[in-house]
Image (spheres, helix red, strand yellow):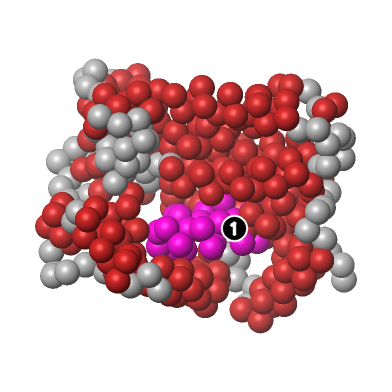
Amino acid sequence: RYALVLLLLFALFIFFFALKYHAIEDNSMGNPELDFYVGRAKEVGQSILPRDEARPILYHLLGGGAGKLLGGNYFRGSQLVSLLSAITFVYATYLLARKLSSEKLALVVMAATAMNTEIIREGVRASSDMLFSALTILTLYQLIKCCWHKPLVKQRKTDFVLLGLFFGLALFTRYTALLLLPLILYGFFISKRNVKQAILIFALTGFTVILPQLWVNYHNFGSPFFSENWKNMGIHYFGIQGDDWNKFYNSYSKDEFRQQLIHNPLAVPKATILEIGKFGVILLPKLLGESFFLGAIFILVAFLYYLRRVFTKLKEVKNLAFIFVFLNVIGVGAVFSIMPRTVLPIIPILYLAIFSYLAMF
């Protein structure tokens, strides 16, 4: 009951904030929301299959459908998808925290997440970040639910269908959802049961969900597995040549990327370590939000406590959420740049670690 009240208050606030303070007029220029996400949604509304070289198209499809329902306002349609995703994200946070702790602690974590400035900022933007984050948290919650205490063979088949569904939708939104796969497989492994049927159900469901994207890639680019994310990785590892980012990006070739990797393989771990360092020093306090800054020393103490707990009890299902934080930060740091919007799903887990630590006193 209290969770639903908090959710309603958050929904009212974020809708008001979006309508009052984040309205982009149709004649805006040079805005990535309007020029990219809203433009793709408009193509969907006009029955044009969008071409996106680096991302799956689920957000474009949803934004286009919502925009058409809103009388052709594709910015508001795309924004509506983000708003509903933010509300889902906050409620999924409550479900996850309640599963891992208690009702009271879950409400505190939910409230802190709802007040986080990064969640609010991305929740009103017309971009796929909040949709992906909500689906990631739902996948993590469903994984823990599947592995919780009961032997996997005794779980309902629908639990694994939902796990495959959430994972497939996350992958249909961002290819970085692949970083969840090792965690999912590890979750099955630590349950120490016959998991062949569970893995099969999960895999079939996830593949069925992502199948439309594979067809779109084949139709648009000639390969079901086409993606130009390697360009972002190359720029992440080696930087750009010259001052014109767009010109370099458009002319960057796979052969050039391959040669750079051959001649400078240490650039990959170097870039990853630098990103992880940036996360710890700069982004961790920012992710916890200007409205809830507990101080770097306390954050470090709480996090070190849970780091020790995770690595001494790796086979506890509860620790899957905390392992996710490390895998997410390392994975994003290895293939992309760590920014608040790229690591949003770890925010609730950071809050859970801090408040769980406080609850011991």
Q: Is residue 328 magenta?
A: yes
Q: Residue visible at 75% across and 44% down?
A: 189
Give the percent coordinates (x, y) of residue 275: 45, 70
Q: Is residue 249 magenta?
A: no
* Dot 1 crowding, Cα within 10 Å, few <14, some 14–19, many 20+: some
Labels in figure, total: 1
Give the percent coordinates (x, y) of residue 148: 82, 40
Location of residue 157 by image quarter: top right
Q: Tell me the element at label 1.
A: helix
Q: Name the residue that disc number 1 marks.
A: 327
Task: Look at the image and give the residue range highlighted in magenta.
Answer: 326-350
Q: Residue furthest front?
A: 262
For the N terminus, the image quarter is top right
Using the image, determine if residue 67 lies above or below residue 246: above
Give the percent coordinates (x, y) of residue 58: 40, 31
In this rendering, does residue 93 appear at all?
no
Location of residue 220 by image quarter: top left
Magenta residues, dominant SS class: helix
Is 129 or 140 nearer to us in this picture? 140
Q: Residue visible at 24% across and 53% down?
A: 254
Q: Residue visible at 48% across and 51% down?
A: 120
Give the percent coordinates (x, y) of residue 355: 75, 62
